[in-house]
């Protein structure tokens, strides 16, 4: 069985009366605001970490999310884990094209093409999403925005994808391509309790003066899990 379990989370900041009394520069307020942003961003943090660990995280078909061994009934063996040719602009161009080709070649469990609605050239091209480590961001932006590629002529990939950076990625040469056009997404986000803002109790000053400190608490109960691997490609480089 494949299940997705929500996990409880709590972020607590303890505010001391002395710190509150002598915080003339507003540093305490900045810390609280920063922690509040972190609490609200918790699902995004989970997603970035799951992307990083996807090649070692089991999916619903018992294979890892990024794997060379996906198989369902009549689909045959399929892979969404590709080996790249490098990270130069020309190499990335070839590898993005290979990743798009792989995304549009997957079969469903009956052996039929999984992507049924691929637009014809010039008829509203599908926009893909690239996720990469910070060191590759400039190269992907150039590949996505440049009219030409050095020594390669016209850039046929111009405007074909959006780029985002994942600072959680530990391998500086690997990157990911996603097709988010379908209803079934690469990842699942579910929750029993959405992340809340940091909340101080009412009459905060009274409790600070009486007990010497007071807690601000943010709670969440949610999970992020891999799902439709046919919408995702990981390209690895040595």
Image (cartoon, rainbow, N blue to C red):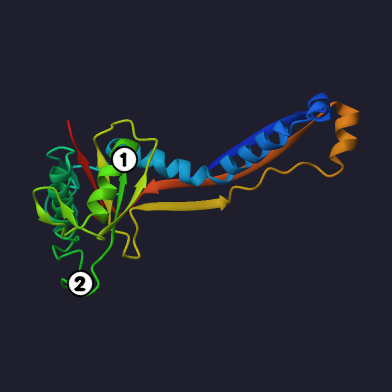
Tell me which residue sits at (28%, 62%) in the image.
127
Which of the 4 image quarters holds residue 113?
A: bottom left
Within 10 Å of the Cα at label 2, are there few (<14), some (14-19), or many (20+) other Cα atoms? Answer: few
Judged by depth in the image, the label closer to the viewer, 2 or 1, is 2
Inter-mark Cα distance, 2 to 1: 29 Å
In terms of depth relative to the viewer, which is nearer, 200 or 148? 148
Which percent across, then down, holds residue 91?
A: 13, 43
In terms of depth relative to the viewer, which is nearer, 143 or 109? 143
Tell me which residue sits at (14%, 66%) in the image.
112
Q: Is residue 160 visible?
A: yes
- What residue is disc 1 on? 54
- What residue is disc 2 on? 119
Would you place residue 205 above or below residue 103 in this image? above
Q: Marks 2 and 1: CB-CB under 8 Å?
A: no
Within 10 Å of the Cα at label 1, are there few (<14), some (14-19), or many (20+) other Cα atoms? Answer: some
Q: Is residue 177 left or right of residue 215?
A: left
Q: SS at mark 1?
A: helix
Q: Going from the N terminus, do you reach mark 2 or mark 1 first? A: 1
């Amino acid at each position: 069985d494949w299940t997705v379990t929500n996990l409880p989370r709590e972020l607590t900041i303890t505010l001391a009366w002395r710190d509150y009394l002598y915080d003339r520069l507003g540093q305490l307020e900045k810390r609280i605001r920063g922690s509040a942003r972190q609490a609200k961003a918790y699902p995004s943090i989970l997603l970035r970490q799951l992307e990083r660990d996807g090649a070692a995280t089991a999916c619903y078909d018992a294979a890892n999310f990024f794997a060379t061994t996906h198989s369902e009934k009549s689909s045959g063996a399929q892979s969404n884990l590709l080996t790249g040719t490098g990270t130069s602009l020309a190499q990335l161009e070839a590898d993005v094209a290979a990743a798009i080709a792989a995304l549009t070649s997957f079969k469903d469990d009956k052996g039929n093409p999984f992507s049924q609605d691929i637009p014809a050239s010039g008829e509203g091209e599908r926009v893909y999403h690239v996720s990469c480590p910070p060191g590759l961001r400039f190269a992907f932006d150039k590949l996505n925005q440049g009219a030409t590629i050095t020594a390669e002529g016209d850039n046929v990939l111009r405007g074909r994808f959006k780029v985002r950076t994942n600072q959680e990625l530990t391998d500086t040469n690997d990157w990911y391509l996603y097709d988010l056009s379908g209803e079934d997404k690469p990842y699942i986000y579910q929750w029993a309790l959405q992340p809340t803002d940091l909340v101080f109790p009412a009459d905060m000053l009274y409790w600070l003066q009486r007990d010497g400190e007071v807690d601000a608490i943010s709670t969440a109960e949610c999970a992020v899990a891999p799902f439709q691997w046919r919408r995702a490609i990981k390209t690895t480089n040595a």
